[in-house]
Amino acid sequence: PGEGADLDARTKSLDRNHVFHSWSAQGALDPMVVAGGLGCHVWDHAGNRYLDFSSQLVNVNIGHQHPKVVAAIQAQAAQLATIAPATANLTRGEAARRIIERAPAGLDKVFFTNGGADANENAIRMARLHTGRDKVVSTYRSYHGNTGAAVVATGDWRRVPNEYARGHVHVFGPYLYRSEFWATTPEEESERALRHLRRVVESEGASSVAAVLLETIPGTAGIMVPPPGYLAGVRALCDQHGIVMILDEVMAGFGRAGEWFALDAFSELDGHGPDLITFAKGVNSGYVPVGGVLISDAIAADFDETVFPGGLTYSGHPLAAASIIGALDAMEEEGIVANARRIGAEAIGPGLAELAEKHPVVGEVRGLGVFWAVELVADRDTRAPVPPALIGLAKKECMARGLLPFAADNRLHVVPPCVVTDDQVAEAMAVYDDVLTILDREI
Ligand code: PLP
């Protein structure tokens, strides 16, 4: 343990001296040291273990160090560690095929990127070139990545200091618990959010709108499962005006929502899905950085004779491609997506509903699969969010009990790997129960 503690101290010192962190004021950081992981656990050098109910940035869907993914990367590294994107490579093609096989019909090509942001960047580029139009409509409660157009398509505060890209318009999406539309039922919320979207599109000039870009289930913004009819209504509006519909499945896809694609949870879209789907995170659980755009046949055909003006040195990187094959095959063989769906319905959903009953600090719980939000409020009647200090306290108390939580604004997101077991869910629920008891006393 002494040696482990020394390594933890050295790790922290190197980090604080030399590593510049994302989305942070650098001065006050005290990052957690992680030396290793397996399945749903991570640990530091000194041997302190945590049950990972964050999946890091909601991306380690298959769990840490899955042996089949590690082996696939090792085998590819031994054979061919890198190759230019302009080449044809068997591993890359097999990865693309495995993604396409699980996607809605009519999306038969994949453009591989380095992650989710540049997937959205390229989807927006394709939509603009396809339509010859400029504007992209997305929601305020969204996150689409940190690069040029992706961060300006983002709705949350991270957009504001980065507004260099042009042609972005925002709307409010459906969110019944904090409805912008005075709605009291999911049906009302759906209908009124659609009307608002339609009015904004018309007012901007429908013929100037290239794309509507939505997270199928907004993730970081609060895991708001869209109410019945909303996604089908967006599809119909896009059809009416020749607008490209882009669904961002970077967080919601590949098991998180208990489906291969989150859009599969919405039978209303059956056979008539988006024109472009962006993905990253769960496709290989982040073992190697990768993302991509699934492209409809109509949009892909635009670039049969015309050059596609986009590309990346590492597009379709063989280590990333091998990790996709390893991850998707293991998820299939081991029923990992089905496990996410079952555990959401049978363990996480009922467990959280019980906590909501018991703890006044819980305003609402919502979600599906391994994708749940617990909305914490200072007052159930006004729905006033708890102050940030209470979220800080919740994080600290979870960590003290060996649970690594995910916190966003006034919420805890319950987002374990898709391989989580019933026993691990029970263990986490006991920790949340203790921590919510502490928070109840603070409000
Ligand atoms: N889109 C969504 C829905 C996301 O949640 C994220 C990341 O959290 C991104 C895009 C950006 O992905 P990346 O960080 O890989 O660029």
Image: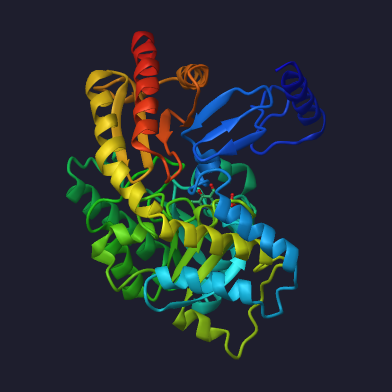
The residue that appears at 41% across and 55% down in the rendered structure is 334
Task: Indicate left or right for 107 with 67 as reference.
Answer: left
The residue that appears at 64% across and 35% down in the rendered structure is 36
The residue that appears at 24% across and 63% down in the rendered structure is 267
Viewer can see residue 336: yes
Quadrant in which the C terminus is drawn:
top left
On the image, the x and y values in percent for residue 248 come to 46, 58
Quadrant in which the N terminus is drawn:
top right
Q: Nearer the viewer, residue 325 or 412?
A: 325
On the image, the x and y values in percent for residue 5 come to 72, 19
Viewer can see residue 290: no
Numbered marks: total: 0
Specify the quadrant of the image occupied by residue 303: bottom right
Above-or-below relation of 231 to 238: above
Task: Indicate left or right for 98 with 31 as reference.
Answer: left
Farthest residue to the bottom: give it.
Answer: 305
Above-or-below relation of 286 to 436: below
On the image, the x and y values in percent for residue 194 come to 28, 57
On the image, the x and y values in percent for residue 22 come to 66, 39
Q: Nearer the viewer, residue 60 or 46?
A: 46
The image's colouring method is rainbow
Above-or-below relation of 103 to 437: below
